[in-house]
């Protein structure tokens, strides 16, 4: 590990790109500066997390695990639509204090495809499939089975870790839980606090991706205030354009 990066590790988890490059006597705007940033990333010493900020250490993405049942849902949905996302709340148990036993699976597709996917899952005999159009009605129905499946709208340009498999990024999950936890998921405030702290501490969170998706869900101002309250990242990082 370079001396400069090692020294910065003791100061903060977040550093500006120009700080990383000071010993190389270059800047992020130059070709050689961009090369050094890329090279340090390949070595696992830093990870760019916004336009001008990096986080010291190697990249670590949260790998959401699927059950055989969710894999079967993906098998049914994938041939029907161009874009989809399938994830279960129990897959988040490693990030939560209170482990969830009730398996709520969210199947997200474009608005125009919701009814078709809902009907196909019902035809495939999946139990307790709910069409999530009326939010309050949907919330009242969740919990009727140990394996609820809610078909709801996939927000345009939602960030996915794997588009072919429809796996959401941790950035998407954070925003969705922040917006929808009381309506659909029942995740407590303390559990959300714990999940977000673990996410920012143990995994790589790209602030650009998080902010872009939060803007699409019209919640960035509230989410930013929440993240600042949790003190999971410096305000300068969250405000970075």
Image: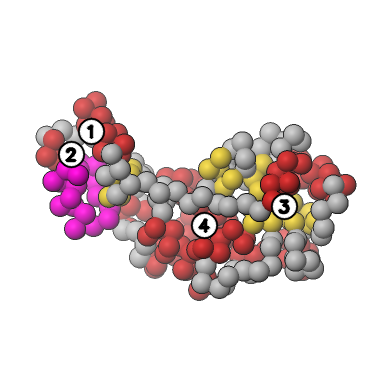
Q: How many neighbours does mark 1 have within 10 angstroms: few (below 14), some (14-19), or many (20 or more)?
A: some
Q: Nearer the viewer, mark 3 or mark 2?
A: 3
| Residue located 52% across and 67% down the image | 96
Measure how far apart labels 3 and 1 are at the Cα level: 45 Å
Q: Give the range drawn in magenta.
A: 1-20
Q: Quadrant of the N terminus?
A: top left
| Residue located 73% across and 47% down the image | 73
Circle 4/circle 1 CB separation < 8 Å: no
Q: Is residue 5 visible?
A: yes
Q: Which circle's residue, 3 or 1, is located before the other in the chain?
A: 1
When the figure is inspected, residue 216 is found, relative to residue 235, above or below; the finding is above
Residue 130 screen position, x and y as percent: 79, 57
User: Which residue occupies the extreme front position in the image?
Assistant: 68
Q: Which circle's residue, 2 or 1, is located before the other in the chain?
A: 2
Measure how far apart labels 2 and 1 are at the Cα level: 8 Å
Q: Which circle's residue, 4 or 1, is located before the other in the chain?
A: 1
Q: Which of marks 3 and 1 is in front?
A: 3
**For mark 4, what is the residue?**
174
Relative depth, front residue between 64 and 185: 64
Residue 98 screen position, x and y as percent: 55, 73
The secondary structure type at the circle numbered 3 is helix
Circle 2/circle 1 CB separation < 8 Å: yes
**For mark 3, what is the residue?**
69
The secondary structure type at the circle numbered 2 is loop
Q: Residue 36 carries which label?
A: 1
The secondary structure type at the circle numbered 1 is helix
Q: Residue 21 carries which label?
A: 2
């Amino acid at each position: 590990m370079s001396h400069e990066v090692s020294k910065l590790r003791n100061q903060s988890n977040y550093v500006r790109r120009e700080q990383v490059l000071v010993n190389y006597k270059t800047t992020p705007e130059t070709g050689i500066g961009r090369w050094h940033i890329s090279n340090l990333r390949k070595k696992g010493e830093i990870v760019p997390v916004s336009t001008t900020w990096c986080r010291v250490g190697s990249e670590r993405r949260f790998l959401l695990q699927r059950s055989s049942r969710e894999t079967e849902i993906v098998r049914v949905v994938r041939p029907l639509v161009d874009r989809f996302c399938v994830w279960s709340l129990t897959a988040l148990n490693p990030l939560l204090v209170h482990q969830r036993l009730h398996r709520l699976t969210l199947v997200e597709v474009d608005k125009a495809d919701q009814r078709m996917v809902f009907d196909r899952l019902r035809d495939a005999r999946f139990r307790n499939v709910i069409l999530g159009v009326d939010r309050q009605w949907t919330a009242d129905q969740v919990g009727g089975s140990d394996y609820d499946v809610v078909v709801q709208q996939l927000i345009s340009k939602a960030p996915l870790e794997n588009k072919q498999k429809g796996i959401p990024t941790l950035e998407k999950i954070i925003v969705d839980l922040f917006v929808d936890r009381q309506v659909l998921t029942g995740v407590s405030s303390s559990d959300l606090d714990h999940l977000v702290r673990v996410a920012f501490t143990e995994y790589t969170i790209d602030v650009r991706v998080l902010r872009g998706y939060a803007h699409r869900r019209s919640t960035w101002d509230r989410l930013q205030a929440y993240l600042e309250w949790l003190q999971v990242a410096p305000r300068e990082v969250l405000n970075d354009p």
